[in-house]
Each structure stands twice: as structure tokens, then as C-alpha cells.
Image (spheres, rainbow, N blue to C red):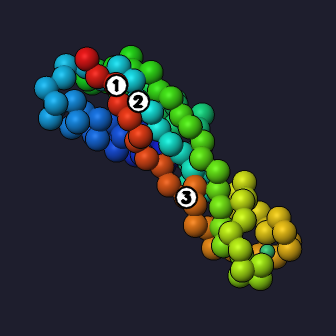
Amino acid sequence: MHEMSLAEGVLDLVSEQARAGGYARVTGVWLEIGRLSGVEIEAMRFCFDAVVRGSVAEGASLEIDETPGSAWCLACAASVTIGHRADPCPRCGGWQLRPNGGTEMRVREIEVE
Ligand SMILES: [Zn+2]
């Protein structure tokens, strides 16, 4: 489950930000997860809850926004929206797609006190 190492990465980042700002606790974390990032949202929630135990982010709420996936279709010469990396182009049914959006996960915001 690669979500575990991703969750640890998120925790490192938010702990660092809390420390840099002199905050004692992180109470909320907002994540953006792209549809094409390969990150399972439910697994991410589970792993996040596990890794924050005993940290500055223990008990923090986790808000997840799923961002749409997009890809450049060579045949259509256009950017199209796809829901999954394995999907064909919704316009022409072709497979020559290069993902160009929704491929990442990032921390958008944290709430501290
Ligand atoms: Zn196409």
C-alpha cells in the first residue's frame, strides 16, 4: 500500500510547517488528490489516521478534494477529461493519451492552533 508512505510524507510536511510557525497542533489537513494519481482515497484516510497517532497532527480532520484527470489526445489534438489512466479518449476512443492533469497529490492547506 503506497498510501502509507504518502501519508508519512504528508505528516512530515505538516509537522514541519507547524514547527516552523511555532504551532503546537495541526487540527486540519486539506489534500488534493488527482483522479489519475493512483492514490486510493479510502486507503489514504486509513493510513493518515494511522500515521498521525502520537504526532502534532493527532486527531486532525482530513479533507480530500478529488481533482479531475485530463490527458492530451494525439489523435484529437485536444485535451480531454478522463476518469482513469486506463480509459480511452472519450472523443475518439483512441489510446494515444498523455496524462497532463490530475496526476498528483498535494497538500493544499493546513489548519493549526
Ligand atoms: Zn481522441
Q: What label sits on residue 103 in the rendered view?
A: 3
Report if residue 38 is visible in the image.
no
Q: Give the residue displayed 36% in from the left and 40% down from the top.
A: 10
Q: Nearer the viewer, residue 15 or 47?
A: 15
Amino acid type, mark 1: Glu
Question: Crowdedness of circle 2 by 10 Å Cα count: few (<14), some, many (20+)?
Answer: many
- 3 vs 69: above or below: above
Q: Nearer the viewer, residue 88 or 39?
A: 88
Residue 105 position within the rendered picture, expressed as x and y whole percent measured from the top left: 48, 49
Amino acid type, mark 3: Thr
Q: Give the residue displayed 13% in from the left and 26% down from the top.
A: 22
Residue 113 position within the rendered picture, expressed as x and y whole percent measured from the top left: 25, 17
Asked if ligand 1 lies within 8 A of label 3, the reply is no
Query: For this view, does 15 lie left or right of residue 90?
Result: left
Pointers 2 and 1 in contact (C-beta within 8 Å): yes
Q: Nearer the viewer, mark 1 or mark 3?
A: 1
| Ligand 1 quadrant assignment | bottom right
Residue 57 position within the rendered picture, expressed as x and y whole percent measured from the top left: 32, 24
Q: What label sits on residue 29 in the rendered view?
A: 2
- The residue carrying mark 1 is 111
Query: For this view, does 30 lie left or right of residue 65?
Result: left
Secondary structure under tag 3 reads loop
The total number of labels drawn is 3
Q: What label sits on residue 82 in the rendered view?
A: none
Label 2 vs label 1: CA separation? Answer: 6 Å
- 90 vs 46: above or below: below
Secondary structure under tag 1 reads strand
Residue 63 position within the rendered picture, expressed as x and y whole percent measured from the top left: 50, 29
Label 1 vs label 3: CA separation? Answer: 25 Å
Query: For this view, does 62 lie left or right of residue 97?
Result: left
